[in-house]
Image (spheres, rainbow, N blue to C red):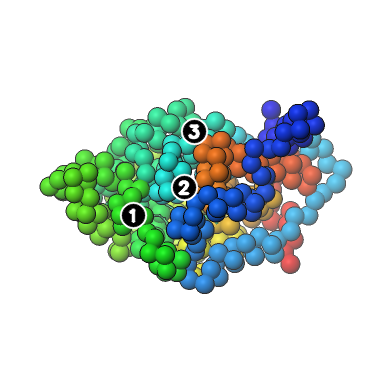
């Protein structure tokens, strides 16, 4: 079955039974429904961005400036969206971005996300700030592909312990997020005084880690305040430096991908330091207001590193056509962020699966209509810049 068949399934169901799709296929409508369900604090924590929102808007505008140039009389009836990432064959060039504290959106949080992604063979990247433990999420993902995202603690024993737990639980690739060593200036969260971690929420992974617990007199269940006080300076407030990457290389025997890269120079340095990939990302515009649009950073990074690194992309992807554009500009695959959280809010695992199926169906159909049989054939000349 191709991803495009989801469109037929919806039409046929509608014709035969009069049934509408369980959720809207329009990401903006789904977001509106999620907004009503979540309430102000949780909605704005997810939807919000840094400062005036200029970078979040720039992310979308950069997609708007690029237009696909469809080619005719090409037989693209049969298409292959598959892609190989670090030796793993994936059915489509899409992963679910790491997102912390998903229990604020749905009680099953990362467990639901992992199940939905696994049902389609798509990797979901587990955040260090997840509201379920590494081992619980691994069990929920079953045979599905798993990647782990590290928020890198300023405590080497905790770092090594997290990496070893993730490896033991079957996570194959490590994504190290560099752009959020401290939280950006986020007016919505400040005005609503809504910051889930400060209540100890969504910290299931550090709070279940033996090396982290070894530094506490009482368990987090007995003394949550003390646990938060140990967590905060360990994970927040100080950046690491390039020379420290050796610790990760020495303690992770799979691919390592640096997330949050926005400059060609940093991408080259990542390659020089023995990294395997980068995610060109500005964290969905949540960190530096006024930062470069992620899509504008993509092509220079891809050109700078050539085959030395696997280049992934996120920030601002909303539709299948967006995925096509990012692939054409040099991404091997993209990470989807906020849209799947709206699916999670509206329908748990089914909602996340629905969002993924819509995105992949639209990508598949857009590829065909634009005259592309495989993602490997996409290049900058498939697009026009306005
Ligand atoms: C609510 C929320 C929580 C996030 N938590 C994390 C996280 O724990 N780790 C991380 O690397 N990125 C995190 N991100 C950033 C995403 O991985 C991704 O870079 C971003 O959402 C992409 O932009 P988009 O939402 O416009 O698609 C978070 C994003 C959101 C919206
Ligand atoms: C110490 C930083 C924790 C941030 C976790 C969630 C996140 O990345 C976000 O954007 O919010």
Q: Which mark is residue 115?
A: 3
User: Helix, strand, or loop for circle 2?
Assistant: loop
Q: Where in the figure is residue 267, as x and y percent of width and height?
A: 47, 58
Instruction: List the residue tagged with mark 2.
Output: 105
- Nearest to N terminus: mark 3 or mark 1: 3
Q: Secondary structure at mark 1?
A: helix
Q: Is residue 316 left or right of residue 179?
A: right
Q: Position of residue 231 (x, y in %)?
A: 25, 54
Mark 3 touching mark 1, by CB under 8 A?
A: no
- Separation of marks 1 and 2 at Cα, in angstroms: 14 Å
Q: Is residue 162 left or right of residue 13?
A: left
Residue 130 drawn at (x, y percent): 38, 45
In the image, 72 versus 19, the foreground residue is 19
Residue linked to disc 1:
197
Q: CA distance from mark 3 to mark 1?
A: 24 Å
Residue 257 seen in this snapshot: no
Dot placed on the residue nearer the N-terminal end, 1 or 2: 2
Confirm whether residue 179 shows in the render.
yes
Whether disc 1's CB lies below 8 Å from ligand 2 is answered yes
Q: Is residue 98 above or below residue 146?
A: below
Nearer to me, 236 or 221: 221
Foreground residue among 12 and 114: 12
Q: Are marks 1 and 2 in contact (CB under 8 Å)?
A: no
Tell which tag, 2 or 3, sits nearer the viewer. Answer: 2
Q: Closer to the camera: disc 1 or disc 2? A: 2
Report the residue at 12% width, 47% height from top.
217
Q: Nearer the viewer, mark 3 or mark 1?
A: 1
Query: CA gap, disc 2 to disc 3?
Result: 16 Å
Q: Is residue 64 above or below residue 107?
A: below
Whichever of labels 2 and 3 marks the residue nearer the N terminus, that label is 2
Q: Position of residue 333 (x, y in %)?
A: 57, 46
């Amino acid at each position: 079955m191709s991803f495009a068949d989801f469109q037929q399934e919806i039409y046929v169901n509608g014709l035969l039974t009069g049934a509408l799709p369980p959720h809207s296929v329009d990401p903006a409508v789904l977001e509106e429904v999620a907004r009503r369900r979540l309430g102000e604090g949780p909605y704005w924590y997810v939807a919000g961005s840094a400062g005036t929102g200029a970078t979040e808007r720039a992310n979308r505008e950069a997609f708007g400036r690029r237009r696909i140039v469809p080619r005719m009389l090409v037989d693209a009836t049969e298409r292959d969206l598959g892609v190989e990432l670090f030796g793993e064959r994936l059915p489509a060039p899409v992963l679910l971005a790491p997102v912390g504290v998903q229990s604020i959106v749905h009680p099953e949080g990362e467990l639901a996300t992992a199940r939905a992604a696994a049902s389609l063979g798509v990797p979901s990247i587990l955040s260090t700030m997840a509201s379920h433990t590494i081992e619980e999420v691994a069990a929920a993902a079953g045979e599905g592909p798993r990647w782990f995202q590290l928020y890198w603690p300023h405590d080497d024993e905790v770092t090594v312990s997290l990496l070893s737990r993730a490896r033991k639980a079957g996570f194959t690739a490590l994504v190290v997020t560099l752009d959020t060593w401290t939280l950006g200036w986020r007016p919505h969260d400040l005005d609503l005084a809504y910051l889930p971690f400060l209540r100890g929420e969504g910290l299931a992974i550090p709070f279940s880690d033996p090396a982290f617990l070894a530094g506490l007199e009482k368990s987090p269940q007995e003394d949550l305040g003390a646990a938060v006080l140990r967590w905060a300076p360990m994970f927040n407030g100080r950046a690491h430096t390039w020379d420290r990457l050796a610790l990760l290389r020495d303690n992770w025997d799979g691919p390592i991908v640096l997330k949050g890269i926005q400059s060609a120079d940093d991408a080259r340095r990542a390659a020089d330091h023995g990294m395997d990939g980068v995610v060109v990302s500005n964290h969905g515009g949540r960190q530096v207001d006024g930062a470069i649009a992620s899509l504008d950073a993509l092509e220079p990074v891809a050109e700078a590193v050539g085959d030395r690194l696997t280049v992934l992309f996120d920030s601002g992807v909303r539709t299948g056509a967006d995925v096509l554009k990012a692939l054409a500009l040099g991404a091997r695959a993209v990470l989807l962020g906020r849209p799947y959280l709206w699916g999670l809010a509206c329908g748990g695992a089914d909602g996340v699966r629905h969002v993924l199926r819509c995105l992949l169906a639209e990508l598949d159909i857009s590829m065909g209509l634009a005259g592309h049989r495989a993602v490997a054939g996409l290049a900058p000349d498939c697009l026009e810049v306005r």
